[in-house]
Image (tube, rainbow, N blue to C red):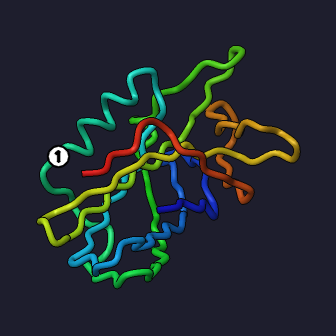
Amino acid sequence: MALRPRRGGINLLTATLDVELEIVNTGDASAGTVQVAARLLSAHRDQQAELDALFAEPRVRPAVAPFVLAPGEARVLPLLLTLPRAAIRPIDMGGRAMFVPVAAVDVRYGSGMGEAQIAAAFAVGVARDGAAKLAPFRLDGPARMHETLDARPHGAPVTR
């Protein structure tokens, strides 16, 4: 799976990410009843524990209608993720309040051996020419949408 952010930012009430999620069936059998759930979180020190708990939940609310994915087939899903501004955990960077968005994606599907899962989190930030790191979103400035975003794997993925 790959996450491609298209736009994102913060307004007075919410943080929003507009992303495309690409899922590819790399197996040799169909993935039946594929269910995709996605949430926007705020990066913080104990992030992995939060992700572990989230990905261990028995059922999650799907972001799109379930579908079947044939062997070798890819599907690109547009997703709009939001987080209330009150739920953002600010990170202090040089005296400035910053927000590092984390998109948590949980894909569950039917396989020949029952239900299977692949889940991963992606840190999202502003891509800057020549910079290896992504820039976080500023919380101390005016509401702003960013068009030049990128995503990086964040934390340990889950495969069951």
Tag 1: residue type? Glu
> Which residue appears at 69% of the width and 15% of the height?
95
Left or right of 55 in this view: 154: right
Q: Give above or below for 131 relative to 44.
A: below
Asked whether 96 or 73 is in front, the reply is: 73
Percent position of residue 140, x then y: 66, 30
> Which residue appears at 38% of the width and 55% of the height?
105
Q: Give above or below for 33 relative to 150.
A: below
Number of numbered discs on residues: 1
Percent position of residue 6, x then y: 63, 64
On the image, which quarter does residue 157 sit in?
top left
> Which residue appears at 66% of the width and 52% of the height?
150
Left or right of 131 in this view: 154: left
Percent position of residue 72, x then y: 44, 80
On the image, which quarter does residue 112 sit in?
bottom left
Q: Give above or below for 144 relative to 4.
A: above
Left or right of 38 in this view: 110: left
- Dot 1 surroundings within 10 Å: few (below 14), some, or many (20 or more)? few
Residue on which the image places disc 1: 57
Percent position of residue 114, x then y: 11, 65
SS at badge 1: loop
Asked whether 85 or 74 is in front, the reply is: 74
Check the image and name the residue furthest to the front.
28
